Amino acid sequence: MDARRIKKEIEFHRRKIEELEQELDQLAQPDRAWIPERFYTAYHALAGIIIGAIAAWVALAFNALGSEILHRDPFRLMKYYATIFTGDLTEANRAAALMVAIGIHTITGALCGAPIHVVASRFFPGRGLRTRAAWGVVLGLVMWLVNFYGVLSWLQPLLVGRFYIGEIPVWVAALTHVSFAVTVLVLQPLGAFDARSYVTEHAASPDPRVESRH
């Protein structure tokens, strides 16, 4: 055989091998197309909305349970919340206003949960359960003071002529906000996302397409 032709064939096959090796390396790498290089704000905001809605219902459940233990109306808190929109409740609008109040309570919890989860995941990741719970207590008390005395104390009288929601016992209002904030921060790790963890796990498990070539 012609030595020159043999050398050309060797060179051709060498290039083919290099191309196949490059393709193999690409298949072995995790798919980075969708992985954000920075903090995944949109994901954490969505996770916070879901966790906030859950926390709103947890707070409502604790409030209803506490009211039942004290032989009070378990929906007393929601009825007071309903006065924000309807003023003094009558028998005619009581049921409808109660449903509206529960809906608004859930939506408000979702909207409040989003920024709390984003901030906790972005600036305070990896905190222990006790630390998160303690900060939840502090945050809940701050939210209660701001909501009741910074906003509603003047907004509700302006809208309906009376600060109805201020008639809720102080400890009930405070514990409702605290239970909400604590629940959001306790559940925070469930909604956290770290792209670096995904890359590590993905790289540790080779692509099945690569395995099939061996």
Image: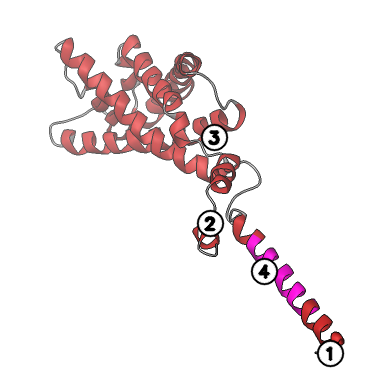
Quick one: SS at disc 2?
Answer: loop
Residue topped by disc 4:
20
Callout 3 secondary element:
helix
Instruction: Give the residue at mark 1.
Output: 2
The residue lying toward the viewer, choosing from 41 and 11, is 11
Measured Cα–Cα span from mark 3 to mark 1: 70 Å
Left or right: 87 with respect to 159?
left
The mark found on residue 181 in the picture is none
Is label 1 in a helix, a strand or a loop? loop
Q: How far apart are marks 1 and 2 (CA)?
A: 42 Å
Q: Which residue has dot 3 on it? A: 118
Whether tag 3 and tag 1 are in contact, CB under 8 A, the answer is no
Q: Which residue sits at x=31%, y=14%? A: 172
- Specify the farthest residue to the right: 4
Could you give the CA–CA distance between mark 4 and mark 3, rounded to whole angstroms? Answer: 43 Å
Q: Is residue 71 left or right of residue 14?
A: left
Q: Which residue lies furthest to the front in this view?
A: 1
| Residue at numbered disc 2 | 207
Q: How crowded is mark 4: few (under 14 residues within 10 Å), some or many (20 or more)?
A: few
Q: Which of marks 3 and 1 is nearer the N terminus?
A: 1
User: Whole-Å distance between the Cαs marked 2 and 3?
Assistant: 32 Å
Residue type at the position of mark 1: Asp
Q: What stretch is highlighted in magenta?
A: 11-24
Could you say which is closer to the camera, residue 131 or residue 196?
196
Look at the image and tell me in which quarter the N terminus lies.
bottom right
Residue 48 picture location, percent across and down: 46, 36
Q: Are marks 2 and 3 in contact (CB under 8 Å)?
A: no
Q: Which of marks 4 and 1 is nearer the N terminus?
A: 1
